[in-house]
Amino acid sequence: QVQLVESGGGLVQPGGSLRLSCAASGSIFSFDRMGWYRRAPGKQRELVAHITSGGSTNYADSVKGRFTITRDNAKNTVYLQMNSLKPEDTAVYYCNARNDYIGYSRDYWGQGTQVTVSS
């Protein structure tokens, strides 16, 4: 059973920074891609960023230039560095691991970590 454990959330002032970590129970090489999603109160879950096994990255327009996703294969960990945080970044952030197959995908999720941006 795959386990993803997030950490690093918290309360930060606007303009501040946080780094989220997602530790996987197994090798992250086994996943086609890993990423971060978030769900703000009253909104649907949305993709924040993902990184493929080959190292390609993709970001939501709202976080481009402020957030950076990286992976440490030796530690089986994916990170999300969040800079210049805004109140609208407030959400529960979820780590995701995905494998793509013909016709479907299989997703694994962490339990989520709260990020609150407020003065």
Image (cartoon, helix red, strand yellow):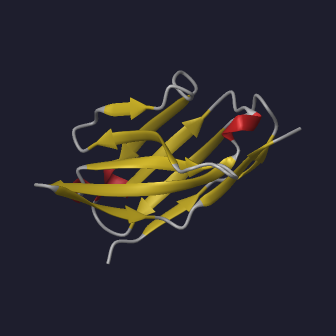
Residue located at (44% from left, 61% from top): 23
Residue located at (76% from left, 28% from top): 15
Give the left or right position of residue 78, taking residue 8 as reference: left
Of the 4 image quadrants, the one containing the C terminus is top right
Give the left or right position of residue 113, taking residue 73 as reference: right
Residue located at (67% from left, 39% from top): 89
> In this orientation, which residue lies closer to the viewer: 49 or 46?
46
Residue that lies at the very extreme toward the right in this rendered image: 119
Residue that lies at the very extreme toward the top in this rendered image: 65
Q: Position of residue 74 (x, y in %)?
A: 32, 53
Q: Is residue 81 above or below residue 84?
A: below
Q: Position of residue 35 (x, y in %)?
A: 41, 47
Give the left or right position of residue 24, taking residue 21 as reference: left
Q: Position of residue 82 (x, y in %)?
A: 60, 36
Number of numbered tags placed on the structure image: 0
> In this orientation, which residue lies closer to the viewer: 8 or 34?
34
Q: Is residue 59 above or below residue 8?
A: above
Give the left or right position of residue 95, taking residue 103 as reference: right
Of the 4 image quadrants, the one containing the N terminus is bottom left
Residue that lies at the very extreme toward the left in this rendered image: 102
> In this orientation, which residue lies closer to the viewer: 46 or 82?
46
Residue located at (73% from left, 32% from top): 86
Q: Position of residue 27 (x, y in %)?
A: 27, 61
